């Protein structure tokens, strides 16, 4: 998994590791810890592999 922060957009990229490909779409929990975010609203986008459109998008508020 990779994470990128660009202004107030947090992009999370779920990537298959070479030799560890999984073809299932099983539900699973993901967690990411990002330190030192300023308070405010952030858009979070979850991408799978190299697909151009996010699989999920939402807004979180950091207090």
Image (cartoon, rainbow, N blue to C red):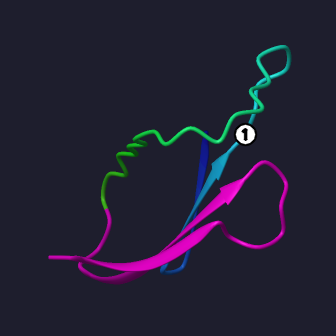
The secondary structure type at the circle numbered 1 is: loop
Q: Quadrant of residue 26?
A: top right
> Between residues 35 and 47, which one lies in front from this camera angle?
47
Give percent across and percent down for residue 5.
55, 65
**Magenta span of residues:** 37-63
Left or right: 6, with 51 as reference point: left
Category of crowding for the residue at label 1, using alpha-carbon neighbours closer than 10 angstroms: few (below 14), some (14–19), many (at least 20): few
Along the line of sight, the residue nearer the viewer: 27 or 4: 27
Occupied quadrant, residue 19: top right
How far across and how far down the image is residue 11, in percent?
Answer: 59, 64
Q: Considering the image in quadrants, where does the C terminus appear?
A: bottom left
Residue at x 45%, y 39% (from the top left corner): 28
Residue at 76% in and 32% down: 16
| Residue under pointer 1 | 15
Q: Is residue 23 left or right of residue 57?
A: right
Taking the magenta stretch, the answer to whether it contains residue 11 is no
Q: Is residue 53 above or below residue 14?
A: below
Residue 37 to residue 63: above or below: above
Left or right: 35 with respect to 57?
Answer: left
Residue 7 vs 55, above or below: the answer is below
Q: Extreme left residue here?
A: 63
Residue 52 lies within the magenta run: yes
Q: In the figure, 57 relative to 1: above or below?
A: below
**Residue 42 picture location, percent across and down:** 40, 80
């Amino acid at each position: 998994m990779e994470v990128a922060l660009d202004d107030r957009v947090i992009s999370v990229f779920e990537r298959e590791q070479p030799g560890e490909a999984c073809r299932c779409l099983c539900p699973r929990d993901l967690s990411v810890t990002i330190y030192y975010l300023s308070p405010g609203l952030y858009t979070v986008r979850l991408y799978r592999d190299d697909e151009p459109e996010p699989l999920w998008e939402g807004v979180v508020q950091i207090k």
